[in-house]
Image (cartoon, rainbow, N blue to C red):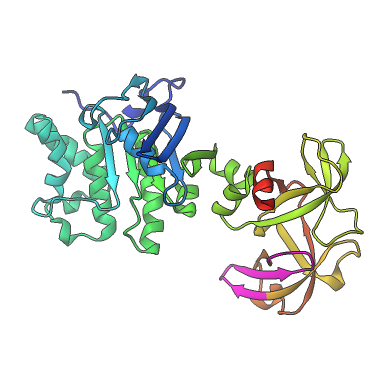
Amino acid sequence: MTTQTPKAQSSVTASEPGLRLRGVSKSFGSVVALQPTSFDVPAGTLCALLGPSGCGKTTTLRIVAGFELPDEGQVLIRGEDRTYDPPQRRRLGMVFQNYSLFPHMTVAQNVAFGLRMARVNRAETEARTRRMLDIVHLPQHADRFPHQLSGGQQQRVALARSLVTEPSMLLLDEPLGALDKNLREQMQFEIRQLQREIGITTLLVTHDQEEALTMSDMIVVMDKGRILQAGSPTEVYEHPRTRFVSEFLGTSNILACTVAGTESGGLRLRLPGDDRSRGFVVTDTAPRPAGSTALVAIRPEHLRIEPAAEASIGEPRAVVVGHVFRGATHVFRLTRPGLERPLIAYRQITGPVGETALPVGAEVALSWEPGSARLLEDEPLREEAA
């Protein structure tokens, strides 16, 4: 058996997705766990399935792994139809929240286990095990047992064990859920670097928005067994299509604005409770009648605030009702007439903390960069009105 280099996974042709799902669905009795679902994961990239509990992300992973068979649809891995293949024929590497290391085996024995089961000869097993331990920076721990390792080190052993067999894909099911915050953040970067070095197509299941944004090339946001939006982390975060996506993928200010009229390439909107100002323009190609309601999302980092006395007369006003200091950022809660809930605004600290702080009760003016207010799709508007 020939030993592959760590870059061998990237040999899949650029035009052939590492993973392709075509109309895959799954029900358990009367419960629809996954509606017909299709998406492609480009070869060598990391795709995060993100959503709340019960959204269908784990069912999707289990169908890809072969632990569940779909009711309909196809699963293609590196261009080969694996829909009905058992797990052992799919050549997948898997890492779970519980690392499931063998406590009576050393680190090296744990990593080599899959190779021994595949009857790889001893010399190659030892060589590939050593190489993988080098890749995960654990060669000095080869003779230790799992209980002698930290949580992060056990995580890396589990990764090495999954990757040493040179799988066609890597599946990660909430792999960092058992770690504390600092270690989890460190492991996000380590796993990401390792995945890029090896170039293996990876499917990550997580409910942690920060984890998905940090680690992935592609995010698939799911809810109630269906895909709501898929794209790069930047695209999904900066251009959410629905209220659910906007609020699930980070903090967002959702405003039910009034359509004041149409302009070239966009709509002119007014904030709730604002009947006199000219309002602001958002890009939209679909016509909407004047007086109708449009749902808009503005991220807190895009919402700019300054003391009302220093602002122009036409800018909308709000009052600071809460403040939290978060090291590099001030977080303000703001209220104004017409809003059902407070706005959230972030203010970056660039000098002495006191210079950028605003007291509770202060009146401020609101503004934001053109283009940072995102018009959401009609469906959430109907849900809100219901």
Q: What residue is drawn where x is 45% and y is 46%?
A: 55
Residue 351: horizontal and vertical position, in percent?
66, 71
Quadrant of the rendered structure where residue 343 is? Answer: bottom right
Q: Quadrant of the N terminus?
A: top left
What residue is drawn where x is 39% and y is 26%?
Answer: 72
Establish if 199 lies above or below 212.
above
Determine whether, in the image, residue 292 is placed left or right of residue 375: right
Note whether residue 217 is visible. no
Q: Is residue 56 left or right of residue 326?
A: left
x and y percent of residue 302 in the render? 69, 56
Q: Does the magenta stretch include residue 118?
A: no
User: x, y percentage for residue 163?
Assistant: 26, 38
Whole-percent x, y for residue 245 in the image: 57, 47
- Is residue 38 visible in the rendered image? The answer is yes
In magenta, the rendered stretch is 322-341
Please, is residue 227 above or below residue 211 in the view? above
Q: Is residue 337 magenta?
A: yes
- For the point 49% across and 38% down, the residue is 226
Q: Is 288 positioned to the left or the right of 243 in the image? A: right
